Image: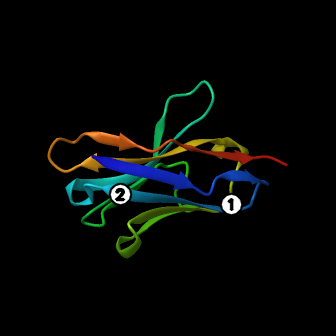
Amino acid sequence: QVQLVESGGGLVQPGGSLRLSCVVSGSIFSIYAMGWYRQAPGKQRELVAQITTGDSINYADSVKGRFTISRDNAKNTVYLQMNSLKAEDTAVYYCNAVARYSLRSFWGQGTQVTVSS
């Protein structure tokens, strides 16, 4: 089992920045990829960014150049640095982990990000 706990969400003005953190515990050795997803009201959950154990990184086109995913293995933590935030970035952001062989997904509880003036 893998447990994920997000933090760092909040209210920010357009153009501002936030950094989300996701602390991972449990069967960390079984994880193949870590990522951030988001879900806005009335919309489907979508991938924002993902990083694999081989350091392959993918971003949604809508966040390229503005968001950066990174990890600190010593702290078992994955980060999402969000810059130049826009109103359309408003959503609940979820941390995700994918198991290496089963490809089972694990989810955090989510953290709200609101971009508004």
Binning the other alpha carbons within 10 Å of mark 1 as few (below 14), some (14 to 19) or many (20 upward) gives some
Q: Which residue reaches farthest bottom?
A: 74
Residue depicted at x 25% and y 55%:
27
Q: Position of residue 21 (x, y in %)?
A: 52, 60
Q: Position of residue 69 (x, y in %)?
A: 46, 62
Residue 109 vs residue 85, the one in the foreground? 109
Q: Position of residue 85 (x, y in %)?
A: 68, 55
Q: Which residue reaches farthest top?
A: 42
Residue depicted at x 68% and y 62%:
17
Q: Position of residue 18 (x, y in %)?
A: 65, 61
Count every numbered label the image shows and give the total: 2
Which dot marks residue 84? Answer: 1
Binning the other alpha carbons within 10 Å of mark 2 as few (below 14), some (14 to 19) or many (20 upward) gives some
Q: CA distance from mark 1 to mark 2?
A: 31 Å
Residue 57, by quadrant, is bottom left
Tell me the SS state at disc 1.
Answer: loop
Tell me the SS state at disc 2.
Answer: strand
**Left or right: 111 as drawn, with respect to 115:** left
Residue wearing tag 2:
25
Front of the two marks 1 and 2: 2
Q: What amino acid is labelled 2 in the image?
A: Ser
Residue 61 vs residue 4, the one in the foreground? 4
Q: Is residue 71 above or below residue 12?
A: below
Does the residue at mark 1 contact the one at mark 2 (Cβ under 8 Å)?
Answer: no
**Left or right: 106 as drawn, with respect to 88:** left
Q: What amino acid is labelled 1 in the image?
A: Ser
Residue depicted at x 79% and y 54%:
13
Q: Is residue 17 above or below residue 73?
A: above
Q: Earlier in the sequence, mark 1 or mark 2?
A: 2
Residue 107, by quadrant, is top left
Residue depicted at x 41% and y 71%:
75
Residue 58 vs residue 93, the one in the foreground? 93
